[in-house]
Image (spheres, rainbow, N blue to C red):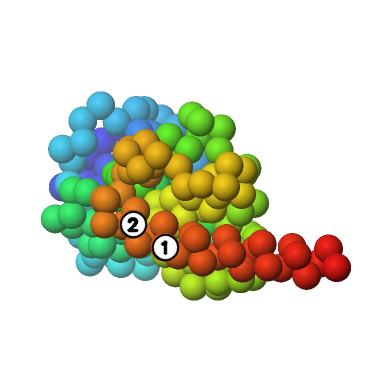
Amino acid sequence: MKYRDHDHIYLDECNGQLIWDYVRGDIICSSTGEVVDRIYSYERPMPKEETLEKIMLELKKRPKTNTVYSKYKVHMKFYIEAEKIVKNKPWLTVDYEKLFEQKKFVKTINSTSTIRALENIKKLGLEKELKNIINLVKNIDPSILSRTERSKNALAYIILHLIKYKTTPDVKETIKIFNISLTTYRRLEKIAKKIYMKIITIEAVVKR
């Protein structure tokens, strides 16, 4: 291994440039695609945009398409964009693995409160039931799609409780599960009751 400048590090054997994959913690050879080492320190600065452009131009001159670098370039693009979105927003987290896999920002950036709420839903085994309620409500009130994950699931939980027990769930327990405020709960409760009445009406019509 030899050093050529501040941003570039190459392997003697194949002259492949080393790529730092900060998400998986691997150091990869751009020529062979092999993992040659692990990242033990994250103090190494990210390459500058002009450096990336220079590398891309150098690789374009090669007769063989470098799929490793192409993949890295796409990941880096999304990584930089995601970092801009969450900058100075410590309450937001990025699911980089999901972002790199689907190459879209859909449901890849969430608040820590939302993540905790989703973890609580999973622990309580409510995922399937809440998903069914959300799908049911979509046909009655499409605006549910515009709500946050926490509010959407909390609303479904209140409706589920109304369907099962003919009453709303415990307020404190619901607030704790979904990490929502009392004000948000009261607002969702009113919406849930209206939707529940529509569900009852539809069921009555179907039974006739």
Q: Compute the Cα span from label 1 to label 2.
A: 6 Å
Which residue appears at 50% of the width and 61% of the height? 193
Which residue appears at 51% of the width and 66% of the height? 194
Which residue is tagged 2?
186
Q: Quadrant of residue 151?
A: bottom left
Residue 178: x and y in percent read: 37, 44
Q: Secondary structure at mark 1?
A: helix
In the foreground, 108 or 76: 108
Count the numbered circles shown: 2
Marks 1 and 2 close (CB-CB < 8 Å)? yes
Left or right: where 53 falls relative to 204: left
The residue lying furthest to the right in this view is 208
Q: Is residue 95 visible?
A: yes
Q: Quadrant of the N terminus?
A: top left
Residue 114: x and y in percent read: 36, 47
Which residue is tagged 1?
190
Q: Amino acid at mark 1?
A: Lys
Which residue appears at 85% of the width and 68% of the height? 208
